[in-house]
Structures are given as structure tokens and as C-alpha cells.
Amino acid sequence: MEKVFESEYRFLCVIWENEPLSSPRLVELCSGQLGWKKSTTYTVLRKLAEKGMVRNENTIVTSLVSKEQVDRQASDELLERTTGGDVPQFLAAFLKDRKLTSKEAARIKKLIEEAEE
């Protein structure tokens, strides 16, 4: 999957929250939520269609990638960029000077247990 830029991500969020939707409705939503002009909306729609992330067929727009897929890619890129993929180092940096509630700590422990080989 190609990299998704911040403006594309916000655009995809509009689609994910409203799909399937007509392209005129998408223009309306992007104008209200993102402050975009019609031409900007159609340009980003075309670019994401070329990347294989959305489909605009008979003026109906749908996503071809899930929010979870895009979020996972962004998380992987951040992990690699900041710590070279070192998960413990990333967690240490992320948690430094942060206080967790017992509920948050329990949730993280559970996630770690589920991720163990």
C-alpha cells in the first residue's frame, strides 16, 4: 500500500464514515468538514483511486482499504522511523513521563500477551 498523507487520511475518514456515498455528496461533506473546493475533492479522489484505495464507479464512492489497514501502515512507518522497528524502545519512549491508569496498563499487558509468539 502506498503512503497516505495527512490530507488524504482526513479525506478517507470522510469516506469511511459515510460510504457508500455519491461523489456530489462527498464534495458537499469535504466542503463542510475540510474546507475544500470541489476541484480539490475530485483531485484527491482521483489520486486515491489511482493508488487503488478508493473506487468511484457510476458516481458512487467506496473505499478499497480499511481504516485499520491505513492506521497499521502509519504505525509501522512511525515505529520504523523512530526506533528502527524496536518495539520495546518505542514503548519506552512513548511511556516515558506518562502515567497510566490501572485499566490502561491492564489493556497494554493483555495486548502484549496476545502478541507473544
Image (tube, rainbow, N blue to C red):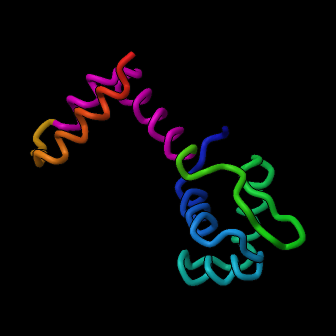
In which quadrant will I find the C terminus? Answer: top left
Q: Nearer the viewer, residue 107 or 79?
A: 107
Taken as a whole, is the magenta stretch helix, strand or loop?
Answer: helix
Q: Quadrant of residue 43?
A: bottom right
Asked if 48 appears above or below 96 in the picture, the reply is below
Left or right: residue 43 compared with residue 2: right
> Residue farthest to the right?
58
Asked if 50 appears above or below 14 in the picture, the reply is above
Left or right: residue 34 compared with residue 114: right
Total residue callouts: 0
- Does the magenta run of residues contain 90? yes
Residue 62 x/y as whole percent: 73, 63
Q: Nearer the viewer, residue 20 or 29?
A: 20
Left or right: residue 72 compared with residue 48: left
Residue 113 x/y as whole percent: 29, 26
Asked if 100 appears above or below 63 in the picture, the reply is above
Q: Residue at x 62, y 72 (%)?
A: 18
In which quadrant will I find the N terminus? Answer: top right
Q: Residue at x 56, y 57 (%)?
A: 9
- Which region is colored magenta? 70-95
Residue 108 x/y as whole percent: 25, 37
- Does the magenta run of residues contain 85? yes
Asked if 105 appears above or below 7 in the picture, the reply is above
Q: Quadrant of residue 100?
A: top left
Residue 49 x/y as whole percent: 78, 55
Left or right: residue 62 compared with residue 113: right
Q: Nearer the viewer, residue 25 or 117?
A: 117
Q: Residue at x 18, y 37 (%)?
A: 95
Q: Quadrant of residue 85?
A: top left
Q: Residue at x 71, y 62 (%)?
A: 44
